Image (cartoon, rainbow, N blue to C red):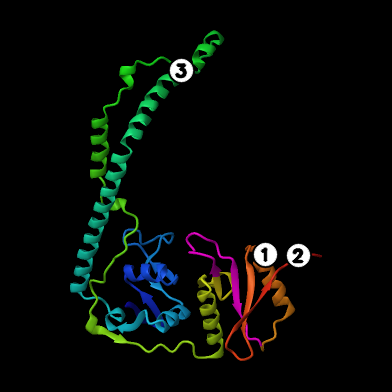
Amino acid sequence: MITLTYVNGKAYVWNADDWLKIREDHRIVGALIGCLPHLPRQDSFLGLPLVLLPEEVTLLLERKVARLVSCSFLTKAPTNEIKQKFEEHRKKMYKEQVECFKEERKRQVISMIDKIVEGKRRKLMGCSSKNTKGSSNSKSSVQDQSPAKVDEKETIIDKEALLKEELDKIKCIDESSTLVQIFTANVWWNEDDATPVEWNYPENNSEKLRYKTFKDLWEKGHYLTSGQKFGADFLVYPGDPIKFHAQFLVICIDGNDALPATDLVALGRLGTSVRKTVVLSSLSEDGNSVMYQSLQWNGTF
């Protein structure tokens, strides 16, 4: 079962295997917020932990594929023993990644050695022909346009020597060459310290509308993420967000609330500017189903 860790009102995933499972098997995306150990000051590539939306947590708990626990050690400064254990585990993970990278690189080089040899040979021939070009003498310009005659012996490449050279380069790869380091286990995890947490989301009508909208779209096969950066509740994708752009901006609105015309115009223009369809979601009168209304900005004057 997937373990979700509860800290300050939010649920996190710390295990890489759990992160992969909820994404591939359950279409739960969340948001990576951790920095990479070797590149802590950049924000282009983020790592674990993964923070989940409240709707994502409720869905996982409802389907009984995850459990929510709190751990006191996450709210306290780590001890020297844990720090040392963490550093040892990190170094071990780095070495494993480097070895995996080297093995994969060796396989690629061995399988492509014939193409590498041919590329080297063409490069030698290309360099020889370029040296004969660029002459300002018009009489020799025609001759310069034809490939220079190169001794075949000069273009013979020792395949075994080249392969050894390429494999020696692989041996020089160190830990700094690996970009992404994701820890696949929690070496500091103590099961005795895990206390089950009662999750009460959704509680009010607004949260119920958000959750039912999220669940309904998720059951239709969509991927969903937070739409906060666009001023919406959710972004809806036709497939994995790594491969697809969001198609819809979903905004949850209570059916009894009045929506000013200026807000409708603003939402329509927003959707057009970001090339997405704005969808308003609300509950039916009996509250059992979700109704949707799309907006489109014509831009006529």
Q: Say which residue appears at 56% left-offset and 10% top-offset.
A: 138
Q: Which residue is mark 3?
A: 147
Q: Which residue is mark 2?
A: 299
Q: Using residue 133 as the reference point, say whether residue 152 is left or right of it.
A: left
Do the CB atoms of the residues marked 2 and 1 lie less than 8 Å apart? yes
Q: Find residue 99 and report its horizontal and vertical position in percent.
A: 24, 52
| Tally of numbered tags | 3
Q: Nearer the viewer, mark 1 or mark 3?
A: 3
Q: Could you say which is closer to the camera, residue 258 or residue 159?
A: 159
Task: Give the SS element for disc 2.
Answer: loop
Q: CA distance from mark 2 to mark 1?
A: 9 Å
Residue 25 lies in what quarter of the image? Answer: bottom left
Q: Find residue 194 and report its horizontal and vertical position in percent.
A: 27, 83
Characterize the magenta stretch by its predominant secondary structure: loop
Q: Magenta stretch: give its range.
A: 236-255
Residue 49 seen in the figure: no
Residue 8 lies in what quarter of the image? Answer: bottom left
Label 3 crowd bin: few (<14), some (14–19), many (20+), radius 10 Å: some
Residue 165 lies in what quarter of the image? Answer: top left
Q: Amino acid at mark 2?
A: Gly
